[in-house]
Image (cartoon, rainbow, N blue to C red):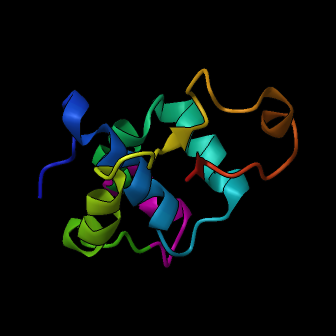
Amino acid sequence: MTPPTDSEDRSLAWLLLHAARGLDSATRQALLEKWGDPSAVYAARDQWRDAAPGVQFPDPRELEETLAWLEGPDNHLVCQTDPDYPTLLQQIPGAPLLLF
């Protein structure tokens, strides 16, 4: 499977990182800091997975319901890097990657 890379797959990349089993929030944050964005984290998973044994990414098809929900009116996905993400929330340890 190829990693999501173009702009229309941005939500999928964030959802894949968010839904990965076996990653705590500190590890997710460290991966984002090292690789830059969720698409790059996903693409590089074979390089860092040995350092985080047991990590399981969901099949992107498992996220189809969430992606369909995002297409609805007034439904939004706010990522940590978005300007709409609350500044004070970014400052707490373990801040969520995503807000729905």
Q: Can see residue 5?
A: no
In the image, is residue 23 part of the stretch drawn in magenta?
no
Residue at (46% x, 44% y) in the render: 76
Q: Main secondary structure of the magenta part?
A: helix
Q: Position of residue 99 (x, y in %)?
A: 60, 49
Above or below: residue 85 compared with residue 15: above
Viewer-proximal residue among 70 and 38: 70
Above or below: residue 83 compared with residue 50: above
Magenta residues, as a range? 46-55
For this orientation, the residue located farthest to the left is 1
Viewer-proximal residue among 78 and 10: 78
Viewer-proximal residue among 13 and 57: 13
Above or below: residue 23 compared with residue 37: below
Residue at (23% x, 41% y) in the render: 9
Viewer-proximal residue among 100 and 30: 100
Query: Picture quarter containing residue 83?
Result: top right
For this orientation, the residue located farthest to the bottom is 54
Q: Position of residue 4 (x, y in %)?
A: 21, 44
Residue at (23% x, 65% y) in the render: 60
Q: Position of residue 36 (x, y in %)?
A: 48, 28
Q: Can see residue 44?
A: yes
Q: Position of residue 65 (x, y in %)?
A: 29, 70
Q: Quadrant of the N terminus?
A: bottom left
Residue at (46% x, 67% y) in the render: 20
- Residue 14 lies left or right of residue 25; in this view the side is left
